[in-house]
């Protein structure tokens, strides 16, 4: 119904006819939790989505597929770009680390 509301004519589905009724119920619950248990890199998401969002209709379609307004409103300025200036290198910056328990240094 959400897809229809946003004008999406087709949505991907997974055929689970081969599963028993109990397995389908288990699959449904696990599938609904996958998003809660995952995380993603916002900048990488932005790079992937930037080509998909050409207008407000595309944005609405992605919202219907489960992305949030925050996901789609990320600031892509500077994504995949090196900074124009690097801070001065300071020899006093500690770069080695030592485990306080065993003394291992890396």
Image: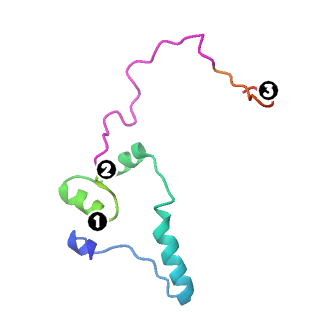
Q: CA distance from mark 2 to mark 3?
A: 44 Å
Label 2 sits on a secondary structure element that is: helix
Mark 1, residue position: 64
Q: Residue at x 40, y 18 (%)?
A: 85
The reply to whether the magenta stretch includes residue 8 is no
Q: Which mark is residue 106?
A: none
> Callout 1 environment at 10 Å: few (<14), some (14 to 19), or many (20+)?
some
Q: Which contiguous range is marked in magenta?
A: 72-94
Instruction: Say whether residue 15 is visible.
Output: yes
Quadrant containing the N terminus in the rendered view: bottom left
Specify which label sits upstream in the sequence, 3 or 1.
1
15 up-or-down from 47: above or below: below
Residue most extreme to the right: 102
Mark 2, residue position: 70
Mark 3, residue position: 103
Q: Nearer the viewer, residue 47 or 37?
A: 37
């Amino acid at each position: 119904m959400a897809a229809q509301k946003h004008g999406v004519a087709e949505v991907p589905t997974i055929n689970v006819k081969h599963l028993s009724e109990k397995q389908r119920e288990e699959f449904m619950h696990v599938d609904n939790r996958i998003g809660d248990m995952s995380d993603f890199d916002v900048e990488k998401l932005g790079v992937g989505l930037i080509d998909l969002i050409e207008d407000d209709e595309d944005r609405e379609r992605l919202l219907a597929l489960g992305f949030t307004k925050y996901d789609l409103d990320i600031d892509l300025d500077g994504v995949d770009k090196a900074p124009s200036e690097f801070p001065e290198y300071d020899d006093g910056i500690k770069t080695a680390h030592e485990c306080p328990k065993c003394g291992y240094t890396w």
